[in-house]
Image (spheres, helix red, strand yellow):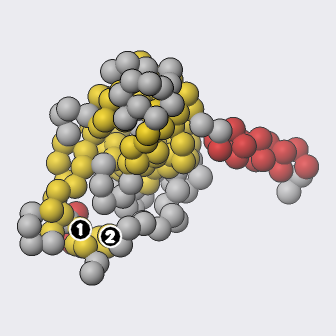
Amino acid sequence: MSVKTVLIAAATTLALALPAVAGDIQVQDAYARAATKMSKTGAAFMVLMNEGDQDDRLVAANSDVAKRVELHTHKDNGQGVMSMMKVEEGFPVPAHGHHALARGGDHVMLMGLTRPLEQGDIVQITLTFEKAGEVTIDVPVDLERQPQGGMQMQQHGQMKMNN
């Protein structure tokens, strides 16, 4: 590997490590994934930090990597099986607080992928907040990151809590 290639890779990694900012909102630790190369859906996860004195709310997202982008969450059906659903009202980001979008919980759903999400790719996602406005972020595709919080994938897109 040439020195130039190493420097470009290092600069790209550093740039992606820096938080994206919109008003008082910072977006940290963003990554995207799809279950397989042939998947027609994917998801993006991140931490939304609000450094301001007023609550804010993520109300929409879009990306050219998907025909539709929606805000989704998982809900327990009362028997330990999780179902995914669209969240019309968006996700609150409290003043001086944060809201984590994580596997098995709230996330940005990429539907009708226009291309495969491959390890190491970068996808652009524009997030729209009620007060902070829009911020476009470069999100690395990380197919190797393991879920946190004890969630295990089950058949047909359902999830079951590990006890």
- Nearest to N terminus: mark 1 or mark 2: 2
Instruction: Return the residue found at the far left.
Output: 78
Residue 39, quarter of the rendered image = bottom left
Looking at the image, which residue is at 23% across and 68% down?
159
* Labelled disc at residue 22: none
Q: Position of residue 71 (x, y in %)?
A: 28, 39
Of 55 and 8, nearer the camera is 55
* Labelled disc at residue 151: 2
Say left or right for 161 vs 127.
left
Looking at the image, which residue is at 83% across and 50% down?
6
As drawn, 130 above or below 6: above
Mark 2 Cα-neighbour bin, 10 Å: few <14, some 14–19, many ≥20: some
Q: Position of residue 160 (x, y in %)?
A: 22, 72
Of 104 and 10, nearer the camera is 104
Secondary structure, mark 1, is strand
Residue 126, quarter of the rendered image = top left
Q: Position of residue 19 (x, y in %)?
A: 60, 37
Looking at the image, which residue is at 43% across and 42% down?
98
Secondary structure, mark 2, is strand
Looking at the image, which residue is at 52% across and 56% down?
142
Q: Position of residue 92 (x, y in %)?
A: 31, 35
- Of the residues shown, which amino acid type is indicated by label 1? Met
Say left or right for 19 vs 160.
right
Asked whether the beta carbons under mark 1 and mark 2 sit within 8 Å of each other, the answer is yes
Quadrant into which the N terminus falls:
bottom right
Of 118 and 88, nearer the camera is 88
Circle 1 sits on which residue? 159
Instruction: Return the residue found at the far bottom.
Output: 163
Q: CA distance from mark 1 to mark 2?
A: 7 Å
Of 5 and 22, nearer the camera is 22
Quadrant into which the C terminus falls:
bottom left
